Amino acid sequence: MFTHVMIGSNDLEQAKRFYDATFAALGGTPGKMDARGRLIYDHDGGRLMITKPINGEPATAANGGTIGIGAASPDHVLAWHEAGTTHGGTAIESPPAERPNGSFVAYLRDPDGNKLTARTKPAN
């Protein structure tokens, strides 16, 4: 259904450090800057794009929004969480843990305040 997710950043260099580290923890590759100045991450058929807002206003995080990123294993979720907190992200909500449906989940805010989750597929 979705072709990509686009989020804003006020500091693309800082965003690149954060997202390069978190995607590497999941087995992904570093982002690439396109001709329009947007960071692009392709991983497992999905695309995350990060840009400075085109209207020139500061980027702000979505209130109530969360971007979910699939992970192959609980170890990948833990590595993603560690990479994120090491590279400017903030741990939020509960510590990384298994949920009642069997998925293993962790939450972070990126350096711009966007809420992210990495999770494995549910057991059911």
Image (cartoon, grey):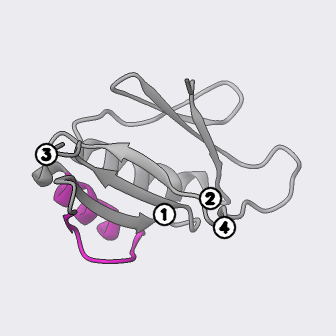
- Work out how far the residue at label 1 is from the one at label 3, CA to CA, in angstroms: 21 Å
Name the quadrant of the N terminus.
top right
> From the viewer's perspective, is the residue at label 1 or at label 3 nearer?
3
* Residue with the mark numbered 2: 11
What segment carries the magenta color?
Answer: 77-98
Relative horizontal placement of residue 101, taking residue 116 as reference (left or right): left
User: What amino acid is found at the position of numbered circle 2 in the picture?
Assistant: Asp
Residues packed near mark 4 inside 10 Å, few (<14), some (14 to 19) or many (20 plus): few
Residues packed near mark 1 inside 10 Å, few (<14), some (14 to 19) or many (20 plus): many
Where is 22 relative to 3, above or below?
below
> From the viewer's perspective, is the residue at label 1 or at label 4 nearer?
4
User: What amino acid is found at the position of numbered circle 1 in the picture?
Assistant: Asp
Q: Earlier in the sequence, mark 1 or mark 3?
A: 3
> From the viewer's perspective, is the residue at label 1 or at label 2 nearer?
1
User: What amino acid is found at the position of numbered circle 3 in the picture?
Assistant: Ser
Q: Earlier in the sequence, mark 3 or mark 4?
A: 4
Res 73 label: 3
Instruction: Answer whether residue 82 is magenta in the image.
Output: yes
Where is 83 relative to 72, above or below?
below
- Kind of element beneath mark 3: loop
**Looking at this view, is 95 or 10 the one in front?**
95
* Residue with the mark numbered 4: 63
- Work out how far the residue at label 3 is from the one at label 4, CA to CA, in angstroms: 28 Å
Residue drawn at point x = 32 percent, y = 33 percent? 29
* Residue with the mark numbered 1: 110
Relative horizontal placement of residue 50, taking residue 87 as reference (left or right): right
Res 49 label: none
- Kind of element beneath mark 2: loop
Asked whether the residues under the numbered discs 1 and 3 touch, taking CB atoms below 8 Å apart as contact, a structural biologist would say no
- Kind of element beneath mark 1: loop
User: What amino acid is found at the position of numbered circle 4 in the picture?
Assistant: Asn
